[in-house]
Image (tube, coloured by chain):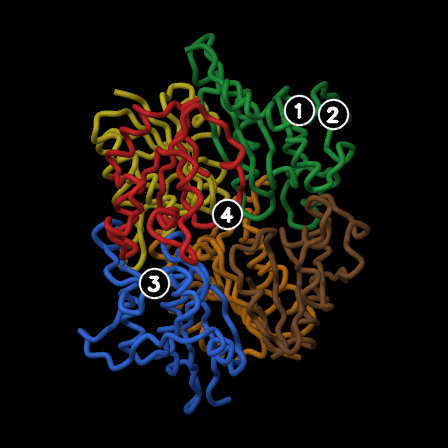
Chain colours: A red, B yellow, C green, D orange, E brown, F blue
């Protein structure tokens, strides 16, 4: 299973992501999920960034919040909506929104 | 080129889950993919015609019309919609009204499915 | 295309928004989808409850009297009646102290199906074997 | 007897925050309190007339009419409502349409205020 | 400040309740907040029940979930909508919904 | 009744649902409420950002170009312009690593008011002195 997961919140109220097993896992940070890529909480980066090397953040949802690409953790690739479509079709078989 | 089916349940104005669904659909159809969108739950409110576009409030109508013009198929859950008092005659032209199995049929035909829950 | 397998995963509690409940009604709709498909084509959903989703599975829900809507329990019973596979995560039932006895069944409606209490690893298998996964 | 003002923002069908607001209003007015309800955000959808009462979907109309009959004042945020394509002529009779300061004025007059957020 | 707080969720996504100081604090558990009164998680009662002796749970929201008054922790008083109105007017000056 | 003090507390992030944003526009409405009140009656809101609510206060929000709506930033600037007290919790700014320099101001619109960065204890005082508290 090659699974692409959209993360749209800062505080995930479900622990599904911790339990899922995938041969390849991608995390696409959108909406308030972008803070995982841009913000440290009490100086600590989000533990989500340790889950997989396949990390993406939606540029449009970064800029709407007054944040800049330079605020994004270096492990996370900045993508736009068009890139997201390519990721969905080319890199993952199943798509989830948690 | 592929086929994308999006199920969108969160409500319209200011709910970014809804905005995301529409912008993703636009990006996908612009790249040549075939796209369908299923509205259920509160998202069905967005098929009401004659939405007033105030700049403090996001509105769906003009974006939905643009997607329809690009060939995106859009369908609203009829039961959810009439439960909210919106009749078919009051809906945006070109949007289909059907039951939940419409969504399942589009899932059957899809290469990729994105189900967006939430309110 | 033949059969398309889908995993419907309910991970949020019932009775807040309605999305968790719509997951169930959408899964049930599999039984009428063939009118929109070619001959031989089918959709086979499996409905799985994990995390806080399992909280919606206690029998005796009194939704019609109190809030004027049908209960999640009645929707789950309808699933069993139309032979939909309903799986619930055993670890999560244990976590919340819900006994298997308190899960709904549809015996009174003549259903053969029962809710299947399974470890999460079985739900992972459902995800692995499905073409599409839908989280609610 | 006291005065209660409720601000209700979550949306109608199946959202229990909305159901709670209405049942609390009913309990308060039945005890002789004076009650007003302000709808903003997605809750404004609930003022649309002719909601079809399907048993799988909660509907607001008959409950709102019952509250109006008991003397509860109900007002919807006009901007939020027209942004969703619902015109005043399509609304439930007896519900007021006004701007946000209506809510603040009712807060001024209230002994107790309950603001229910969420979507 | 005599503050009555409605708690409507199992997982509070805000920590406001931990920080608020009130001369008298009441917690009224409604909607999915009722699980704080009825359910142990991994055998442990909700920490909310230690915050104040003034604990209430809405009967209607217990029964709709297939739970019974006998499932409610003995520290929590079962009330109905009419009781909630009295609590709001008689026992607290300010009301919050978190 | 004279003046009624209200605390508007934004504790959830902007740009998910719209309730956090409506908190701000409702607070601004204080300036026109007198048309509905008796002479001498007023409503005085104080708008406070705590917890994840502080995340909505970074300047440079590009909402109109991207999503076609006005930004939270522009609403906050409007608050300052109409002399509404806007307080933000210092501990929470620190928690999320947001510098005071990155908060919006309305200097370009000629406003005298600034966002006040205060410890949570000051926000507690606002709650204590208010007749009504509204959490968003």
Residue D95, position as x, y percentages in the image: 48, 64
Residue placed furthest toward the left: F108
Task: Please say if F6 is above or below B55.
Answer: below
Kindly identify which numbered label has been placed on residue D51: 4
- Is the residue at mark 1 from the same chain as the one at mark 2? yes
Residue carrying label 1: C80
Residue drawn at (44%, 53%) of the image:
D45
Q: Which mark is residue F99?
A: none
Identify the element where label 1 is drawn: helix
Q: Residue B21's image quarter?
A: top left
Q: Looking at this view, is E64 or F61 the one in front?
A: F61
- The picture quadrant where one finds residue E25 is bottom right
Reading the chain from its start, which is encountered first: label 1 or label 2?
A: 1
Nearer to us: label 4 or label 1: 1
Callout in the foreground (3, 4): 3
Q: Is residue E70 left or right of residue D55?
A: right
User: In the current view of this chain or complex, which residue is farthest to the front?
Assistant: A43
**Mark whose residue sits in front, 3 or 2:** 3
**In the image shown, does D89 or D108 lie closer to the viewer?**
D108
Q: Answer yes or no: are tags 4 and 2 on the same subunit.
A: no
Query: Circle 3 is placed at which residue position?
Result: F98
Mark 1 belongs to chain: C
Closer-to-camera residue (E26/D74): E26
In x, y percent, where is residue A13? 52, 46
In the displayed structure image, the side of residue D65 where residue F16 appears, left or right: left
Whether E52 is drawn above or below D89: the answer is: below
Is residue F68 in sight in this rendering? no
Return the residue at label 2: C109
Give the alpha-carbon distance from disc 3 to disc 4, as whole Å.
46 Å
Label 2 marks a residue whose chain is C
Disc 1 vs disc 2: Cβ atoms closer than 8 Å? yes
In this view, the residue in front, F83 or C50, is C50
């Amino acid at each position: 299973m090659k699974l692409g997961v959209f993360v749209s919140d800062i505080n995930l109220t479900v622990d599904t992501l911790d339990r899922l097993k995938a041969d390849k896992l991608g995390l696409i940070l959108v909406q308030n999920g972008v803070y995982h890529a841009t913000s440290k909480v009490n100086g600590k980066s989000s533990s989500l960034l340790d889950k997989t090397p396949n990390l993406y953040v939606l540029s449009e949802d970064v800029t709407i919040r007054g944040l800049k690409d330079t605020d994004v953790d270096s492990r996370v690739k900045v993508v736009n909506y068009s890139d997201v479509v390519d990721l969905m079709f080319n890199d993952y078989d199943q798509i989830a929104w948690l | 080129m592929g086929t994308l089916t999006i199920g969108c349940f969160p409500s319209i104005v200011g709910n970014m889950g809804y905005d995301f669904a529409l912008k993703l659909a636009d990006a996908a159809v612009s790249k040549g993919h075939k796209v369908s969108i299923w509205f259920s739950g509160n998202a069905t409110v967005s098929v009401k015609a004659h939405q007033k576009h105030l700049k403090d409030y996001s509105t769906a109508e003009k974006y939905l019309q643009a997607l329809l013009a690009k060939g995106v198929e859009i369908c609203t859950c009829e039961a959810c919609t009439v439960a909210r008092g919106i009749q078919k005659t009051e809906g945006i032209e070109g949007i289909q009204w059907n039951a939940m199995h419409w969504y399942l049929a589009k899932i059957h035909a899809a290469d990729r499915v994105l189900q967006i829950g939430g309110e | 295309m033949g059969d398309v397998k889908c995993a419907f995963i309910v991970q949020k509690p019932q009775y807040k928004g309605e999305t968790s409940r719509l997951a169930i009604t959408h899964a049930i709709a599999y039984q009428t989808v063939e009118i929109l498909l070619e001959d031989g084509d089918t959709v086979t959903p499996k409905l799985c409850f994990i995390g806080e989703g399992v909280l919606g599975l206690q029998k005796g829900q009194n939704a019609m009297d109190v809030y004027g809507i049908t209960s999640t329990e009645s929707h789950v019973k309808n699933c069993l009646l139309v032979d939909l596979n309903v799986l619930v995560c055993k670890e999560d039932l244990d976590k919340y102290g819900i006994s298997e006895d308190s899960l709904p069944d549809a015996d009174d409606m003549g259903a053969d199906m029962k809710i299947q209490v399974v470890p999460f690893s079985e739900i992972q298998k459902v995800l692995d074997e499905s073409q599409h996964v839908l989280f609610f």
